[in-house]
Image: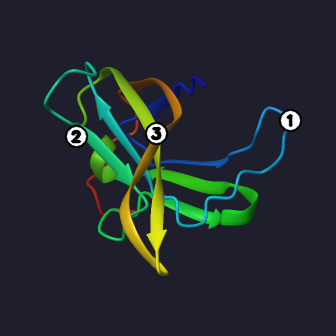
Amino acid sequence: MIVNINTYSDADFVQSFLYKTVALAAIDLFDYPLRMMIRINPADVTTWIECSTWADNGRIVITDHAAGAFTLTIPIAVLSTLPVGVYNHSLIQTQTSTVAGVSSGSGLRKDIWRGTLTHAAGPTRWKLGDL
C-alpha cells in the first residue's frame, strides 16, 4: 500500500488510520508494535524522523487494537527543524512471537505501507512553546 504524507513546518501532523483487509475487515493490532522511519533515500544511514508505538517514542498510538485503529503524530518540535524536501518512509509491523505467555519482541516484520513525506515551509512563525 502507498501512503503519501504532506507536512508543514508550522503545525503538528496528526492523522488517524484504520488498518483493514481489502474486504474492509479490521486487522487486530494487539501486541503488534508499529515502527516508521523517514529518510531522504531508503539506503541512507540518517533517519530524519522515527515514529513507533514503543513507550520511549509514542508517536504512534494504537487507539483501538481490535478495530485496527491508530494515530500517527509528528510534533511541530520535530517538523519545525526538518529541512524542506521529499522523504521516503515505511510503516512496519512486528508480529511478535509469544512463548509461555511471554512476548519475545522478535518475529515477522510485515510491510504495512510505504510512501513519501513531502515537507514544506509553513507561513506561520512563532517560538516553540508559544500558543
Q: Nearer the viewer, residue 68 or 70?
A: 68
Question: How far is mark 3 from mark 2, CA to CA?
Answer: 22 Å
Q: Secondary structure at mark 2?
A: loop
Q: Position of residue 78 (x, y in %)?
A: 29, 47
Q: Earlier in the sequence, mark 3 or mark 1?
A: 1
Q: Quadrant of residue 99?
A: bottom left
Q: Is residue 75 visible?
A: no
Question: For the point 46% across and 39% down, which residue is it?
Answer: 91
Question: How far is mark 3 from mark 1, CA to CA?
Answer: 21 Å
Q: Position of residue 88 (x, y in %)?
A: 36, 23
Q: Quadrant of residue 9?
A: top left
Q: Quadrant of residue 66?
A: bottom right
**Is 31 drawn above or below residue 86 in the view shown?**
below
Q: Earlier in the sequence, mark 1 or mark 2?
A: 1
**Of labels 3 and 2, the one closer to you:** 3
Mark 1 Cα within 10 Å, few/some/many (few <14, many 20+)? few
Q: What residue type is disc 2 on?
A: Thr
Task: Decide if residue 81 is on the left or right side of residue 70.
Answer: left
Q: Position of residue 71 (x, y in %)?
A: 57, 55
State the residue position of label 3: 91
Residue, far bottom? 101
Residue 23, disc? 1
Q: Nearer the viewer, residue 95 or 89?
A: 95
The answer to whether the residue labelled 3 contacts the one labelled 1, judged by CB atoms less than 8 Å apart, is no
Task: Decide if residue 116 is on the left or right side of residue 48.
Answer: right
Q: What residue type is disc 3 on?
A: Leu
Q: Is residue 129 visible?
A: yes
Q: Secondary structure at mark 3?
A: strand
Question: For the point 21% across and 21% down, which residue is it?
Answer: 43
Mark 3 Cα within 10 Å, few/some/many (few <14, many 20+)? some
State the residue position of label 2: 81
